[in-house]
Amino acid sequence: MNIALNPAASFGNPFTWLFKKASAVTAARMTVIPAVGDMHCIQKGATLVVPRPMHREIVCLRGSLWITHDRDPRDVTLEPGQSYRADRNARLLIHALDNAELRLISAARSKALNACADLPHQPTSRGIDL
């Protein structure tokens, strides 16, 4: 996972108007997909929108993804096998840099999976007799 700062997201940047203008032109050509379900295949250049992503986990299965939250200066890129867990509730945009496949895990399921991963492994006491 790579994280970078987005200069357009800062509030004191004198060039913010330039990034907003470029974003408006790009938005006119952008394919926006609502996030319904957990498995998604998105074509290069399409954007998946997650309205309230708090604690949801994005797992990149194929391709490469660019992830950002509204009003957040951080940008995240994911390659296959990498994941990102949303730490805020601001709208999340997942943009496909290549044709991509991803899994969007719900907050409750993500918490349950993490809780299970934290449990110590207990070997069973019974063996198999042949």
Image (cartoon, helix red, strand yellow):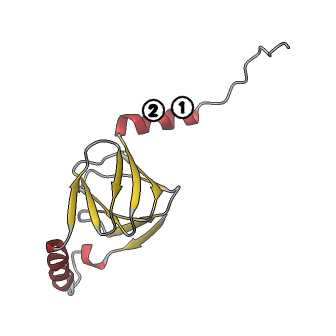
Q: Secondary structure at mark 1?
A: helix
Q: Residues within 10 Å of mark 1 (few under 14, many from 20)?
A: few
State how many labels appear: 2
Residue at screen point 18% across, 73% down: 29
- What is the three-letter code of the residue carrying label 2? Ala
Give coordinates of residue 101: x percent, y percent.
Answer: 41, 55
Give coordinates of residue 35: x percent, y percent.
Answer: 26, 49
What quarter of the picture does the C terminus occupy? top right
Q: CA distance from mark 2 to mark 1?
A: 6 Å
Q: Residues within 10 Å of mark 2 (few under 14, many from 20)?
A: few
Left of 64 or right of it: where is 19?
left
- What is the three-letter code of the residue carrying label 1? Cys
Left of 76 or right of it: where is 32?
left
Residue at screen point 73% across, 19% down: 124
Residue 22, by quadrant, is bottom left
- Residue designated by label 1: 116
Instruction: Using the image, determine if residue 20 lies above or below residue 96.
Output: below
Q: Secondary structure at mark 2?
A: helix
Residue 112 tag number: 2
Residue at screen point 24% across, 63% down: 70
Residue 36 tag number: none
Left of 63 or right of it: where is 91?
left
Residue at screen point 14% across, 73% down: 28
CB-based contact (under 8 Å), mark 2 and mark 1: yes
Instruction: Using the image, determine if residue 23 lies above or below residue 74.
Output: below
